[in-house]
Image (cartoon, rainbow, N blue to C red):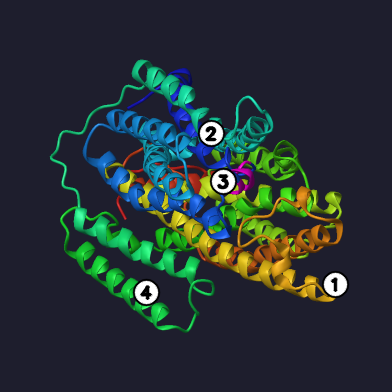
Amino acid sequence: MTMTHRQILEALSGLLLGLFVAILSSTVISNALPRIITELHGGQSAYTWVVTSALLATTATTPIWGKLADLTSKKTLVQLALGIYVLGSVLAGLAQGTGELIACRVLQGVGAGGLTALAQVIMATMIAPRERGRYSGYLGAVMAVGTIGGPLIGGVIVDTSWLGWRWCFYVGVPFAILALIVLQKTLHLPVVKRKAQIDWWGATLITAAVSVLLIWVSLAGDQFAWTSWQTAVMVVGALVLGALAIRVETRAAEPMIPPRLFRNRTITLAVVASIAVGVGMFGASIFLGQYFQISRGQSPTMSGLMTLPMILGLLVASTVIGRVITRTGLWKRYLVIGSALLTIGFALMGTLRADTSFTLLSVYMLLIGVGLGMTMQNLVLAVQNTVGPHELGAASSVVAFFRSLGGAIGVSALGAVLAHKVKDYTADGLAQLGIPASSSGSGGALPDVHTLPGPLRAVVESAYGHGAGDIFLAAAPFALIALIAVSFIKEVPLRQHNGNPVSDEVERESTLAAGAGAPVIRTGEQR
């Protein structure tokens, strides 16, 4: 299907608006979450699970959305995802406790998973790989705007007395309805006419294995010891469920995650890198709002403004590098540079404390933002370039699945690390003041530092600042794993059309020859 630049932009308009809604659902609460959890009388575990529940739902449903995209109408699917998101948002805004809020966030995550996966799939259907880098920049820009606007919108809503935090969930609804209207008018894709065979057993087992693993990570060290019988049961249970999922996937006619995809080295290495990037992107970054509000005593609105260096780095890098990739057809060098910057940025953020200079902090966040901008979309692009049109949905969703999985594990694991470290640092600080640890008065709930007496406030701010540095330091090895993985990916120049990759061998050789300054000779010979 050949489309002009204007037609592509018109078709992408509603899709990008839907993607903005998906990003907004996760970012709008980032700076509002400390206030939300405090008002609902939740603790660090609830803070973590409000984020993790949505990520888990996104992770579990991404392969399902991707597989459905290969079997049925992509336009209908993206509209369904928007409808589910609207329902989840309205219910989340009505929640009366952290348990209800977590359940509603699951529903939001299902819708957001569809929007995230389908945006990549539909774009790949309309645009050839060589041109896709240019439009991937638009996706990156929308993600950056959603990431910038979300925390700021959430902060302003929470700080506005006549609105309140519930509007953090309602605010995305008008955008979702507008996206539905625009998609109906502008998105016209051919509908695949073949019977849908969904691997529900595989989806169930994958979801169950991931869920048990995340529950163990978030509860171990708090509700029970890391070496307890509960740990043994959960770890063994997750491994058994994972093994059953692999067995089912190898025998299913239409597996959720086709095992044959992992025979391709590019896909396997991109998946490893996506897990690592997900850990860093979601796991570490989600706690920045908490750091600014508790360790530095900033308002939700100011917390959003203080993360701008990271978001601007993401915006500029994704847009500029996307255009450069379209012009050259080469992408590996940017994955390597981006992963290296991400590793350096996380390592430097490991020095974070409550009194760290904001100038230094801005530089560290900028490095992380540029690194994310150069890696996120280009990992998907590299994978899409290796598969045929009939597997675009499955391949794209595999990368998104493992990135979300890395994020969900990262949020749970790093949230557990943060809770443990804060508890230890607070106890040490109180001991130095000669105050019993029970005098902190938090009872496991997130503290409101503005209500604490001076010496106690200093202890709490220092504990959360030091703890935030620790989780960024813990995320740095994952970024290093991503760097190693992308270094071993074999670069194949982007294809000029959406045909089967096998038929593009001559075109790839021609592209390489042209890039080397050699004459391009097209023949009918097959190698």
User: Quick one: 391 or 242, which is closer to the camera?
Assistant: 242
Kind of element beneath mark 2: loop
Q: CA distance from mark 1 to mark 3?
A: 67 Å
Query: Which mark sits nearer the N-terminus, 4 or 1?
Result: 4
How many residues crowd mark 3 within 10 Å: few (<14), some (14–19), many (20+)?
few
Amino acid at dot 3: Gly
Amino acid at dot 2: Arg
Amino acid at dot 1: Leu
Kind of element beneath mark 1: helix
Amino acid at dot 4: Met
Judge depth for marks 1 and 2 and give the one in front.
1
Query: Which mark sits nearer the N-terminus, 2 or 3?
Result: 2
Q: Are marks 1 and 3 in contact (CB under 8 Å)?
A: no
Residue 346 seen = yes
Query: Which mark sits nearer the N-terminus, 1 or 3?
Result: 1
- Residue at label 2? 166
Judge depth for marks 2 and 3 and give the one in front.
2
| x then y, percent, for residue 184 | 34, 19
Residue under the point 64% across and 54% down: 287
Query: Which mark sits nearer the N-terminus, 1 or 2?
Result: 2
Judge depth for marks 4 and 1 and give the one in front.
1
306 sits left or right of 242 in the view: right
Please state the extent of the stretch shown in magenta in the rendering: 32-38
206 inside magenta stretch? no
Kind of element beneath mark 4: helix
- Residue at label 3? 515
